[in-house]
Structures are given as C-alpha cells and as structure tokens.
Image: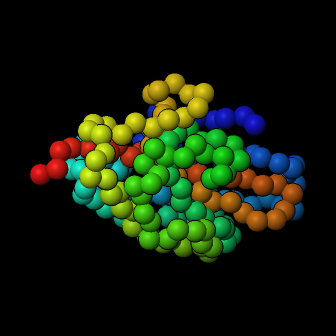
C-alpha cells in the first residue's frame, strides 16, 4: 500500500482511501481531532519532557469525533511521524511503547461531535539510556522517525473504508535520576 507522510505540522490530519469505491448514497463526513490539553512552550502541541530515569511524565489528550456520524476511535503510539496505510496495526511500534500507559487501552465509539479525554503516562525505566528517545520508521528518513501518539477514526461497514488520523509528536529526553 501507499505510504503518506505528513512532516510539516505538529498536528497532522490525513485521510487514506483504503478500499472500495465512493457513491453518493454512502458519502458521509468522517474526521478526528486530537488536542494536547497540557502542553508547554515552546511547542504546546507536542508531548515534550525531560524525564529522569525511574520517573514519569503525564499528559491529557482530548480525542474528538469531528465527523457527521458515530465512529470508532482509538489511540496508538508509533515511531513514525508519517501515517502508514492500513490503520493502527500497520504503524511501526513506538520506541516508547513499553513505557507508555493510557487510561483507555482499546477502541471507543464516539457520537458525532463527542470527545473523550485520555491520560497518557510515559514511565522511564531506571536504567534507560540517557538522551532523546528517537523513533524508528522502516523505509523513512530519520527526520520522519518521530515518536507520535496517533488518534484514529475508522467507520465500520459500507463500500468505502476511510482511515482518518491526527497525531501529536512525542519528544522524550531521559535525564539522570535526581
């Protein structure tokens, strides 16, 4: 499948046509928004922190169904700033994957315009290597291998299946334990 990359914005919204054909009878608006509720300057839209070994950082992310009908939504951490076709299961796992916990671990159905807030915690192991935790995205330049928390929106049924996603970059730097 074709890979589509969004590298210029801190929050990227991308739609991928993954199967079928469109018809007027099945046309409807789908969409998802993700918003970091407690970001800090200079990039308030990114999860960024220097976290000492053995400590944690926590963020709150608002996920909104911006579409016109109920949709299934999920969040997934990935090592890529770009979006791979095929939904959450096709994303390369985040290099932070084993460090991340979320208050909601699975998909949720949100009505049109409905939001939910997810707590995302990054817990750095006591013996983690110092420095920036880099992403890894197979086949991508290093500049696009950025840990990202993606919000996905994917309608069920119909002739057209569209995967919609929006992401928040994650820049975690491991520091010495204090």
Looking at the image, which is closer to me, 122 or 150? 122
**Which quadrant holds residue 61?**
bottom left
Q: Is residue 173 visible?
A: no
Whether 99 is drawn above or below 147: the answer is below
**In x, y percent, where is residue 72?**
65, 67
Viewer-side residue, 121 vs 8: 121
Residue 18, image x, y percentages: 77, 46
Q: Is residue 108 left or right of residue 97?
A: right
Instruction: Identify the residue at image location x=50%, y=42%.
Output: 79
Q: Locate residue 177, reporting x and y percent.
A: 16, 50
Residue extending furthest toward the front: 127
Name the residue furthest top: 141
For the N terminus, the image quarter is top right
As drawn, is 16 to the left or to the right of 21? left
Looking at the picture, how far across and down is residue 94, in whole percent? 49, 46
Q: Quadrant of residue 135?
A: top left
Q: Residue drawn 58% across and 68% down?
A: 106
Rendered position, 101 above or below 4? below
The answer to whether residue 104 is above or below residue 43 is: below
């Amino acid at each position: 499948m074709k890979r589509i990359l969004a590298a210029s914005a801190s929050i990227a919204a991308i739609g991928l046509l993954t199967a079928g054909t469109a018809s007027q009878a099945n046309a409807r608006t789908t969409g998802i928004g993700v918003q970091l509720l407690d970001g800090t300057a200079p990039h308030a839209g990114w999860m960024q922190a220097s976290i000492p070994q053995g400590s944690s950082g926590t963020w709150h992310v608002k996920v909104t169904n911006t579409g016109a009908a109920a949709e299934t939504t999920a969040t997934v951490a990935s090592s890529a700033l770009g979006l791979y076709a095929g939904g959450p299961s096709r994303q390369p796992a985040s290099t932070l994957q084993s460090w991340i916990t979320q208050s909601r671990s699975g998909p949720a159905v949100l009505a049109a315009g409905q939001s939910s807030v997810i707590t995302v915690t990054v817990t750095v192991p006591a013996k983690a290597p110092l420095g920036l935790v880099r992403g890894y995205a197979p086949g991508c330049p290093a500049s696009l291998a950025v840990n990202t928390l993606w919000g996905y929106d994917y309608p069920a049924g119909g002739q057209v299946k569209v995967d919609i996603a929006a992401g928040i970059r994650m820049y975690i730097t491991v520091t010495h334990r204090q």
